[in-house]
Amino acid sequence: MILAQSAARNVGIVIFAIIIVGFLVYLFFNLLEGRKEGGSEIELAANRKPYFPDEILETRKLDQSLLSGLFFLAVIGIALPLYWLGEPGRHEGLVDNTIELWTERGGESYEENCSACHGGGGAGGIASFAVTEQGTGEFVASVDWVAPSLTSVLTRFTEEEVTYTLNFGRNGVMPAWGAPGGGPLTEQQLEIIIVYLRSVQKDADAVQAAVQDGLIEAARDEWVSRDPDLSAQLRDAHYAVARATQTGQSSLIEEAEAELGSVQAMLGETFPNAEMAAWLDEISDPSHEEYLTYGKLIFINKADAGAYSCARCHTNKWSYDGANDLDVNGEPLSTVDGEPGYVQGGGWFGPNITGGAEVAQFPNVDNHIDFIRRGSEDGIRYGVAGQGGGQMPGFSNRLDEDVLVLNEETGEREAVNWPASLTEEQIAAVVAYARSI
Ligand code: HEC
Ligand code: HEC
């Protein structure tokens, strides 16, 4: 399309050049002629020259005029429909150009406003956040809050829902960017960033690969947690980093981080990826006794800065690794019964889904699965007594009729089909886990 467009532009430039050159040539000869005529105007005046006799005027001359009229009529008759036929292409070219321009500008705006937290190209990152005591506002700890990757956000949320998050921010960690939330960007500036985000969305294979990598990490964490010695060793290494960070001394921080790195490398060798993958394969079978563990690992998947997880919204303190971090008094930030850990699904940005809440909300498991596949919609009720706010993401694929992309094979423009974050099997497993907590 862009090629066709520039071709059309080139033809236009050539025609323009021919017209200009032709006009200059005409002007040149006209002036030359004019000079020659100097002083003989009366003799050469057009109306004093003898003209064709009637026989010629009424035959040859008339025929010539009529023929040339017919010729130009034919030209117009062909050129206009051709122009009209080309119009949609020109319109699409304009749309393509606009999208291209917005993608570029949105990318610049993204790098300027968002990449510090969400990473370059939307890859995911961390936001520094000060945890304070609820009520008193007293400082508790400075933490690294994961800012999810945005390279699959358009499959879980509609562009309208993303705009809502951009307008109002989220929970005080993600700042408000739009005017409605008191932010600095206009509606169009937000739209341009979203158009840019379209260009960095992962394809189905890349999403599945990322989810699988995260599951392997989660499987390793699970195995470490089942070994008291190894888990104590890992936790100590994390706390050493937390203490060093509180001193603010970079040499201490580096040393502690290096130690944590070597413990993690040792754990990587103890529980190799291939073994973890094979175990995942086994427990993903619904009849396996550890099937619910598989569902839990999906719930807490850390891949792409938690983008595919449930815990980041439904588990308090999970997004800043609270069980592995310390407050100013050296106490773990997240504990359960005095031990470092999380109340999975206990509620945070998303509601508490523990204690049988979900079986009551969705007596029919298929309705539950369907809710996780499609997410919530603003103002639409779900389950027995749920009121959607549009902020619960959908984990299945999402067809967006408003975004047309060119299908290279058919040459047709089609609604974009953003790939699913989780497979149908993974959604069923995470639902089974959520119903059990
Ligand atoms: C100060 C750090 C920071 C900046 C800057 C920032 N964000 Fe965020 N953003 C976050 C955090 C942290 C979250 C996750 C909040 C949570 O845990 O619920 C988030 C969440 C989001 C979400 C929701 C994603 C999801 O899957 O739930 C979107 C969309 C988003 N940000 C887009 C943007 C865009 C676009 C910009 C730039 C205009 C931006 N953010 C700038 C920190 C930031
Ligand atoms: C970006 C944050 C976010 C993520 C990630 C998220 N949720 Fe939610 N979830 C919500 C919000 C917010 C609601 C409340 C509905 C609303 O506001 O639209 C909700 C509602 C729910 C409900 C209905 C609760 C009720 O009883 O009303 C269930 C079940 C649920 N989520 C399960 C999950 C599961 C399972 C996952 C992971 C596959 C997940 N959620 C991931 C934010 C999130």
Image (spheres, helix red, strand yellow):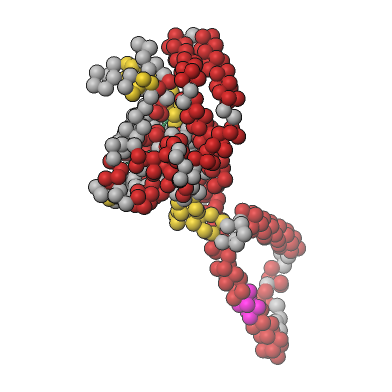
The chief SS type of the magenta part is helix
Rendering quarter of residue 324: top left
Between 162 and 145, the one lying in front of the other is 145
Q: Position of residue 285 (x, y in %)?
A: 49, 45
Q: Position of residue 37 (x, y in %)?
A: 73, 65
> Which corner quadrant holds the C terminus?
top left
Residue at the image point whose x is 54% and y is 11% from the top: 255
Q: Which residues are magenta?
A: 69-75
- Ligand 1 lies in quarter: top left
Is 74 in the magenta? yes
Q: Position of residue 261 (x, y in %)?
A: 56, 19
Between 196 and 38, the one lying in front of the other is 196
Q: Is residue 241 left or right of residue 26?
A: left
Seen as rendered, the residue at the extreme bottom is 55
Residue at the image point whose x is 45% and y is 45% from the top: 287
> Which corner quadrant holds the N terminus?
bottom right
Residue at the image point whose x is 38% and y is 24% from the top: 341
Q: Is residue 433 visible in this depiction of the protein?
A: yes
Q: Position of residue 296 (x, y in %)?
A: 42, 36
The answer to whether 239 is drawn above or below residue 60 in the figure is above
Is 234 in the magenta? no
Q: Is residue 234 visible in this depiction of the protein?
A: no
Residue at the image point whose x is 56% and y is 40% from the top: 209
Between 43 and 126, the one lying in front of the other is 126
Between 288 and 112, the one lying in front of the other is 288
The total number of labels drawn is 0
